[in-house]
Image: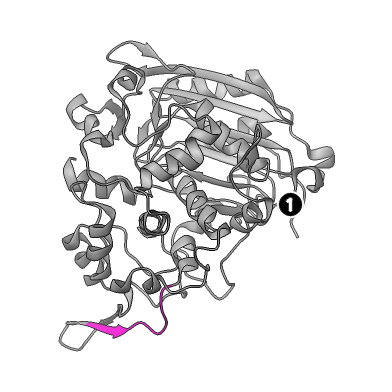
Amino acid sequence: MRGKRLAMALAMTMACAASAAIGRPLQARPAAAEAPRIDKARIDTALRHMVDSGRAAGASALIWRDGKEVYFGSAGMADRKAGRPMRRDTIAQIFSMTKPVTGVALMQLWERGRFHLDDPLAKYFPEYAAMRVYAGRDAAGQPIYVPAERPITIRDVMRHTAGFAYGPGPTPAHNAYVAADPLALTIGLPEMNRRLAGVPLLFQPGTQWSYSIGVDVQAALVEKLSGQPFADYVREHIFERLKMTDTAWRQPDARLPRFAAMNVKQDGKLGQMPDAEARTLNFQDHALTPGGFGLASTLDDYQRFARMLLNEGELDGARILQPSTVKLMATDQLDPAIAERLWLPEKGAVGFGLDFAVRKRPPQTSGENRGAVGEFFWDGAASTLFWVDPVNKLTAVFFVQTMPYDGTLHRDFRAAVYGADYKGPPGD
């Protein structure tokens, strides 16, 4: 995969989910007798098994609880060909774990009164004023397009209910998306918007949940509302303030020796991506700075972002968001009438907030990922994962570089963190 095919494939495979509304950590519902015990040996064993089973070349994890580090561990190799082990300072491609960062950036501007969540997107980008919606085919087999019944709102863009596509699919609207190529790496965010606005929607805004290019539209909004290039805004207002020194879209050459190699599973076997192809994952030479993917980071850097969220928007004296804003983002935004949610139910008993999925009920089956009601999380195409658990005052960041996305790694890691039978406190 290279060029636009690579960008589209990566964007499409970024999976995620999360949990219900949070309160202040000190006011969170107590976990009582079900409080999990962090067992280092159990987690170490799980990471080693991921490598031994051929599902990951290397794996690492960092967990904080009650304001202190309670676990770091790693297994296997960051680069098997070079013989480099997975280390704490290894830089990994986090793909869709970029999305929560973009959402935090946009909500900073919301706090400053730059927009309302239910503003029409067309108020800021007029090209979205007259959207068409795919409505099936006529008797001759030709596609039918009808006008959108209401405008796309910024809330739609943040909760994946706008109707945008995200790559190939079964309808002519998907074909139009592919032809438009709005995530071409050679274009900037304004051109991305222009191309996307010409693509018919998959459904009427607000009626379904469908993972989409909407977070890249959020990046364009940050650029428009702040007057800064998107990457510059994020660096100045999030990364520098949180001391996330190794996180960026465009990594300097001096850091490249710390990058983990990308691994792709084909015919049941995990193989290392060729270096020339892997280099296209670093955005140094690309015009596009996407909001939905593209960041590379370290365990410690992303853990600082997660800890900020657990601390209700503040870390080490740096206020990034107000507590009420974090709570809003981690609150389910999907109306019960939105029944069509594609693969989101596969994540468990979850809803969806603003750029996070949110856990609404305890695990319902033995095979479901372990976690507590009130948790919010996201993951990435290379099978990376993070979550914030206010009930247990816990944050976890998990790195592997395995494509396509392998949810069994998350199931096993969560079981190792919480215990295989953990369900947490009951939901509402």
The residue at the far front in this view is 227
> Where residue 324 sits in the image (x, y, percent)?
68, 56
> Where residue 73 sits in the image (x, y, percent)?
55, 19
> Where residue 98 sits in the image (x, y, percent)?
43, 43
Residue plotted at (17% across, 43% down): 3
The residue at the far right in this view is 32
Quadrant location, the N terminus = top left
Foreground of the two, 142 or 206? 206
Q: Amino acid at mark 1?
A: Gly
Q: Is residue 209 above or below residue 278?
A: below
Foreground of the two, 377 or 41? 377
Q: Is residue 249 above or below residue 233?
A: above
Is residue 347 in sight in this rendering? yes
On the image, numbered disc 1 is attached to which residue? 23
| Badge 1 element | loop
- From the viewer's perspective, is 275 left or right of 305? left
The residue at the far top in this view is 83
Q: Is residue 88 above or below residue 27?
A: above
> Where residue 221 sits in the image (x, y, percent)?
39, 59
Residue plotted at (55% across, 63% down): 113
Residue plotted at (65% across, 40% down): 314
Residue 415 within the magenta-colored segment of the rendering? no
Q: Which residues are magenta?
A: 144-152
